[in-house]
Image: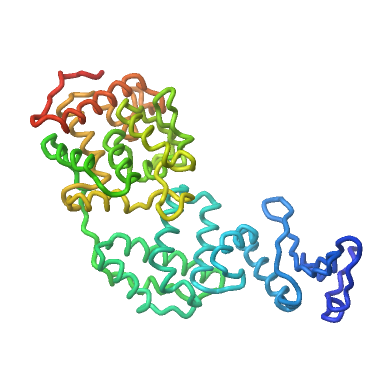
C-alpha cells in the first residue's frame, strides 16, 4: 500500500532551507513546493492530461500562501474534471491578468470557449469569431463581474447597445453564446441559472432574406470600379478586389493563410476544417488574382494570414471588415454584401457566360454529384474550372473598363 503523504504545515515551509540542488516538499494530490538553491519557494501542481504528464506553476511563497496554493490546486483539479487542461487555461488567461480561481464571466467564458475549441466542435475561424465578438462587446461591460451576480437587465442593456448600431444579427448571436456560457456555468456550479434564456423575444427579430447581390453585369460593374478606387486600408482593398475573382465565402477568404497559396500551380488550397462542407477545396487563381496577391505579399507575407486584423497580426481580419468596406464605398446592405459576390458569379456565369452549372456549383464548394450519385472530389474538373476562373476574371476586367456589357461567346468554358 503506497505511503500516504503528510500535508505540509506553515512551519515546515518557513523553516525549509536551500540546498545545492532543487528539492521538493510534497503536500499531496499533486501539489508540492519547489525549493531552489537561491531560496526560491515555488508552488507547483503535477498532473496528467491527455495521457501526458504536465506541470503547472501556481505562484511563489509567501506571496501565495499554503491555503491559497491548495485552493489553486482544487481549481485546477476542477478544470481537469471538466475536460480542460489547466495549463492551457492559464496560458489563455495570461494576457488578461486573471487567475484560475476567478469566477468572473470572462474567465468562465474562456473556459467554455477553450473546452469547445479543443473538442473540435468549431472550425478555427468560427472559434476566433466567437471570441472576437465576446472580447469586443461582452467582456468590457460584464467580463469582470462574478457570473452568478449578472442580472438579465444588465445583459439586455449590452445586447440592445449592440443592436442599436445596426448589428442586430450579432446581438442575437451573442445572446445565444452567452446562453451557452451560462449553461456551462450551471453544470460546473459557477451559476444557478441561465439569464440569457429570460431574454428570448426581448430583441427585435432579424429579418430573413438572401444576401444582397448584384446579379446583372450592369449592377456589378459600378461596385467593381468603386472597389478599385477604395482609399481605405490597402489590406481591406486587396480582399475586396480578390473576393469577386474567387467568389468563395467571405470567412474562407478572411482566414486565408499564405501557406495555402501555391504560386507555381496558381491555386489556393483551403483545408477541410475551414470549409463549411468540411471537405478540402481548391480555388484556381487567375492572372488577375495572382497579381493582387503578389502586390499584397510584401505587406503581409511575413505573417500567417493574407488579411491580418489591424489590431493583431496573430488574428485574421474581422468578420465585419469586408462589409464595412462596402459601406464606406457608399453601398447599402440592400445593394451589396461580401457574400453576395457568390450569387453574382453563379448567376452571370450561368446566364451570361453559359458555363456548365456543375462547374460553377463545384467551384462554389456546393455538394455536387455525378450521374451515379458519387460526390466529386476537390480535383474534379480542375482544368475546366481553371479555364472558367480565368474567363470570369477577364470578364470582370472588361466590365470595369468599358461602358457596355461584354457578352463572351456562348459555352466558352466546358
| Image height of 293 relative to 115, above or below | above
| Image height of 28 relative to 220, above or below | below
Relative horizontal placement of residue 365, taking residue 353 as reference (left or right): right
Relative horizontal placement of residue 55, taking residue 184 as reference (left or right): right
Residue at x 39%, y 60% (from the top left corner): 133
Most extreme residue toward the left, as rendered?
404
Kindly tell me whether residue 83 is visible in this rendering: no
Where does residue 30 sit, x and y in percent of width and height?
77, 65
Residue at x 87%, y 63% (from the top left corner): 23
Where does residue 190 sit, x and y in percent of width and height?
54, 74
Q: How is the image coloured?
A: rainbow
Residue in the foreground of this view, choosing between 208 and 372: 208
Image quadrant where one finds the N terminus = bottom right
Q: Tell me where residue 156 sits by quadrant.
A: bottom left
| Image height of 198 relative to 19, above or below | below
Kindly tell me whether residue 242 is visible in this rendering: yes
Relative horizontal placement of residue 19, taking residue 76 as reference (left or right): right
Where does residue 11 sit, x and y in percent of width and height?
86, 81
| Image height of 341 relative to 137, above or below | above
How many marks on residues? 0
Residue at x 39%, y 25% (from the top left corner): 266
Image quadrant where one finds the C terminus = top left
Residue at x 69%, y 74% (from the top left corner): 71
Relative horizontal placement of residue 297, taking residue 242 as reference (left or right): right
Residue in the foreground of this view, choosing between 237 and 57: 237
Q: Tell me where residue 91 sits by quadrant.
A: bottom right
Where does residue 121 sit, x and y in percent of width and height?
49, 51
Q: Tell me where residue 345 sits by quadrant.
A: top left
Amino acid at each position: 500500500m503506497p505511503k500516504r503523504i503528510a500535508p505540509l504545515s506553515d512551519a515546515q515551509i518557513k523553516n525549509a532551507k536551500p540546498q545545492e540542488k532543487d528539492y521538493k516538499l510534497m503536500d499531496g494530490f499533486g501539489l508540492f513546493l519547489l525549493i531552489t538553491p537561491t531560496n526560491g519557494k515555488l508552488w507547483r501542481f503535477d498532473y496528467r492530461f491527455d495521457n501526458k504528464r504536465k506541470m503547472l506553476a501556481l505562484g511563489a511563497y509567501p506571496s501565495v500562501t499554503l491555503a491559497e496554493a491548495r485552493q489553486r490546486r482544487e481549481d485546477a483539479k476542477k478544470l481537469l474534471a471538466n475536460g480542460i487542461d489547466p495549463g492551457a487555461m492559464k496560458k489563455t488567461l495570461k494576457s488578461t491578468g486573471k487567475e484560475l480561481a476567478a469566477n468572473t464571466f470572462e474567465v468562465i467564458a474562456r473556459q467554455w470557449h477553450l473546452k469547445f475549441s479543443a473538442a473540435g466542435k468549431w472550425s478555427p475561424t468560427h472559434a476566433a469569431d466567437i471570441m472576437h465578438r465576446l472580447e469586443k462587446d461582452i467582456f468590457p461591460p460584464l467580463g469582470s463581474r462574478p457570473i452568478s451576480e449578472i442580472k438579465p437587465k444588465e445583459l439586455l442593456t449590452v445586447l440592445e447597445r449592440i443592436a442599436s448600431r445596426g448589428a442586430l444579427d450579432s446581438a442575437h448571436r451573442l445572446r445565444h453564446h452567452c446562453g451557452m456560457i451560462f449553461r456551462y456555468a450551471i453544470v460546473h456550479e459557477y451559476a444557478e441559472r441561465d439569464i440569457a434564456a429570460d431574454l428570448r423575444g426581448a430583441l427585435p427579430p432579424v429579418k430573413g432574406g438572401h444576401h444582397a447581390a448584384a446579379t446583372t453585369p450592369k449592377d456589378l460593374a459600378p461596385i467593381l470600379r468603386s472597389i478599385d478606387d477604395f482609399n481605405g486600408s490597402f489590406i481591406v482593398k486587396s480582399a475586396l478586389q480578390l473576393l469577386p475573382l474567387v467568389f468563395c465565402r467571405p470567412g474562407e477568404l478572411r482566414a486565408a493563410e499564405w501557406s495555402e497559396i501555391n504560386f507555381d500551380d496558381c491555386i489556393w488550397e483551403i483545408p477541410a476544417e475551414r470549409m463549411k462542407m468540411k471537405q478540402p477545396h481548391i480555388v484556381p487563381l487567375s492572372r488577375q488574382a495572382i497579381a493582387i496577391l503578389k502586390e499584397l505579399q510584401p505587406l503581409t507575407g511575413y505573417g500567417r494570414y493574407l488579411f491580418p486584423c489591424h489590431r493583431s497580426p496573430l488574428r485574421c481580419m474581422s468578420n465585419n471588415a469586408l462589409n464595412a468596406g462596402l459601406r464606406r464605398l457608399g453601398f447599402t446592405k440592400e445593394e451589396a454584401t461580401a457574400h453576395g459576390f457568390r450569387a453574382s458569379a453563379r448567376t452571370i456565369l450561368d446566364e451570361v457566360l453559359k458555363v456548365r452549372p456543375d462547374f460553377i456549383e463545384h467551384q462554389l464548394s456546393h455538394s455536387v454529384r455525378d450521374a451515379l450519385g458519387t460526390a466529386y472530389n476537390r480535383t474534379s474538373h480542375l482544368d475546366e474550372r481553371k479555364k472558367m476562373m480565368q474567363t470570369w476574371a477577364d470578364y470582370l476586367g472588361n466590365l470595369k473598363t468599358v461602358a457596355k456589357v461584354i457578352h463572351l461567346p456562348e459555352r466558352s468554358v466546358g
